[in-house]
Every structure is written in structure tokens, then in C-alpha cells.
Image (spheres, helix red, strand yellow):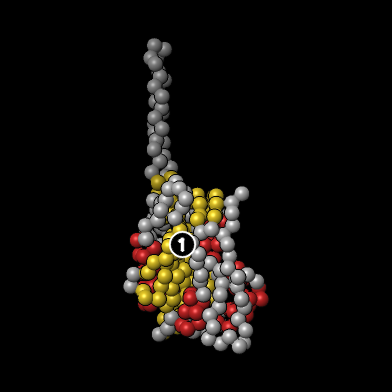
């Protein structure tokens, strides 16, 4: 039986704790996303994680085979002739274009408006999304799973003015990486920052995020190179807190997370 990851105690915010930081568990990506469809096996001991990366449930587009052209009937072979096996035509796949997203978002200083899914990290060419290519909304109950109790979650989310969330997970075209992004929007940039700062880690390697003094990353090495390692980055842009998780086979290279964090930061800053 796999061992569970030790979880820190979560203390709810009280009215007297103005200026204090909320305390929560490891980001949901660390504690929860490992059991979603497509990750076929999980073994966790402290902060060491083992997973097998699976294939997305549904591709963002379909590939159709072109029908084979019918040929003219051939003459019957003579009794002395040895019939040759009929050659099977090779179907030519036809790429069906992905639908164009109709989501819209706006940036006004530190405030983000419109549909938060609009700001999700764009998927690289050839990537396959789990579920809708537009991503999914994060319900309040899903965010509450970051906390030890519903009462602690409700009090903290109310105090910080939680508004909405968005998430998307995809598999790279070469099948070597799975990337998940979760964004949460709060009533102000200060509240988003406090939520990001409430993340705590044990027995992991922490590192800085290039070009982002507020960001932090953690590296979780697998016990064996045949298992899957994990990278998690956490930061904020304005009133949005975001977490990027990268799963790869073996000890992860920090570069993919650094690049993903950069692109997500740019998307939130400019909306483009």
C-alpha cells in the first residue's frame, strides 16, 4: 500500500488575524491531481511521487481516415497461375482543425475580467487536452480541498474574496510530459499573493522562478528513474494566483516548468 503524503495542519483565519497569512496544504496539484484519470498508478512517500502517465480521455480534435478508392475488378487467374494477395490500400489521415475558442478576457492594471479560462497557458502545437480544449472552471468546493476542513476553507476563501477558478491539463505531442495549470482569482492582488504564500512544502527541493521574484518552484524526484518526477511552480499576477504542475518520467529538468511559468505570466500580464 502506498504511504500518504504528510499534510500540515490548517488553521482557519479568525477576525482578529488581520494581516496573518492563511495556512493550507500542498497545492492541489501535488495532493489531488495525481489520482485523476490518465495517471494510472500512484505511490507517494513523504514528497516522493511515482506515477504512470496515461493518455488523455479525449483528444481536442479527431483524425479521420480518407476512404480508399475502389479499383477495377481484376480478371480471374488461370488454373496454373498462383493468385497474388490483394494489396491493402493505406488510408491517408485527414486532420480536422480544432474549433476556434470564443472565450474573452480583459486586463485592467492588476484586475482580470471576463472568462478566466481565457488566460490559461496556451497549449503547445500537437498537445492533447484532457476534457475541453478551453479548459474547465474550478468550483469553490474543489478549492476547499486544499484545506483540512470545510470551515477553515470557507473562512479563508471568504476572507480573501475568492471569485473564480480555471484549470486545464494536457499531454505534450511527444507524450513525454503532462502539464496542468490552475488559476484562482481573488478580490485583490494582495489577497492572491497571500494565498500563494500560504503554500508549504516538506522534503522537496525549492528553487527560484526565472524572471519572477515572487514565484517559487519545487522539485520532487522519483525514487527510481523509471518512475515519474514532478515540478510545481506557484506565483501571482495581479488578482490571480496560478500553479503550474509538470509531470515527466525520471528526474525532471527545471527548464519546462520555467518556460511554462514564463508563458503563463505573460498571458496574465497582457492577455495575449
Q: Residues within 10 Å of mark 1 (few under 14, many from 20)?
A: some
Along the line of sight, the residue nearer the viewer: 46 or 91: 46
Q: Which of 133 and 33 is in front in this view?
A: 33
Residue 5 placement (x, y as % from top left): 56, 59
Using the image as rendered, state which of residue 128 and residue 211 is in the foreground. Answer: 211
> Does residue 158 sit above or below 79 in this rendering?
below
The residue that mark 1 highlights is: 204
Residue at (58% x, 68% y) in the render: 8
Q: Is residue 246 above or below residue 157?
A: above
Q: Is residue 213 positioned above or below 16 on the image?
A: above
Residue 31 seen anywhere in this rendered image of the structure: yes
- Answer with the quarter of the image where residue 45 lies: bottom right
Q: Where is residue 62 in the image (x, y as percent from the top left)?
A: 46, 52
Q: Is residue 133 visible?
A: no
Residue 50 percent location from the top left of the image: 50, 52
Q: Is residue 13 above or below residue 144?
A: below
Quarter occupied by residue 28: bottom right
Q: Which residue corresponds to the image point at 45% horizontal and 58% vertical from the top-left?
A: 220
Position of the C terminus by quadrant: bottom left
Q: Residue at x 50, y 66 (%)?
A: 201
Q: Which type of secondary structure does the marked residue at label 1 adopt? A: loop
Q: Looking at this rendering, what residue extends furthest in the left direction?
A: 211
Q: Where is residue 56 in the image (x, y as percent from the top left)?
A: 50, 53
Q: Residue furthest top?
A: 80
Position of 107 with respect to 160 (left or right) is: left
Task: Give me the residue at 38% from left, 43% from top.
Answer: 92
- State how many labels appear: 1
Amino acid at each position: 500500500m502506498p504511504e500518504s503524503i504528510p499534510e500540515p495542519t490548517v488553521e482557519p483565519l479568525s477576525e482578529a488575524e488581520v494581516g496573518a497569512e492563511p495556512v493550507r496544504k500542498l497545492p492541489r496539484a501535488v495532493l489531488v491531481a495525481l489520482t485523476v484519470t490518465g495517471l494510472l498508478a500512484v505511490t507517494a512517500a513523504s514528497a516522493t511521487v511515482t506515477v504512470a502517465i496515461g493518455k488523455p480521455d479525449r483528444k481536442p480534435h479527431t483524425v479521420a481516415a480518407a476512404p480508399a478508392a475502389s479499383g477495377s475488378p481484376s480478371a480471374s487467374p488461370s488454373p496454373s497461375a498462383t493468385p497474388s494477395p490483394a494489396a491493402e490500400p493505406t488510408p491517408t489521415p485527414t486532420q480536422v482543425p480544432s474549433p476556434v475558442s470564443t472565450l474573452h478576457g480583459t486586463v485592467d492594471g492588476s484586475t482580470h475580467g471576463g472568462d478566466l479560462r481565457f488566460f490559461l497557458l496556451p497549449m503547445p502545437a500537437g498537445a492533447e487536452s484532457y476534457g475541453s480544449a478551453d479548459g474547465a472552471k474550478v468550483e469553490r468546493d474543489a478549492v476547499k480541498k486544499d484545506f483540512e476542513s470545510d470551515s477553515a476553507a470557507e473562512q479563508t476563501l471568504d476572507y480573501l474574496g475568492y471569485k473564480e477558478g480555471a484549470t486545464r491539463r494536457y499531454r505534450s505531442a511527444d507524450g513525454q510530459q503532462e502539464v496542468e495549470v490552475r488559476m484562482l482569482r481573488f478580490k485583490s492582488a494582495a489577497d492572491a499573493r497571500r494565498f500563494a504564500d500560504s503554500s508549504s512544502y516538506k522534503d522537496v527541493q525549492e528553487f527560484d522562478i526565472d524572471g519572477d521574484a515572487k514565484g517559487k518552484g519545487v522539485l520532487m524526484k522519483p525514487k527510481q528513474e523509471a518512475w515519474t518526477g514532478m515540478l510545481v511552480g506557484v506565483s501571482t499576477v495581479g488578482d490571480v494566483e496560478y500553479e503550474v504542475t509538470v509531470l515527466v518520467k525520471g528526474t525532471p529538468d527545471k527548464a519546462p516548468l520555467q518556460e511554462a511559468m514564463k508563458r503563463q505570466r505573460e498571458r496574465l500580464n497582457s492577455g495575449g
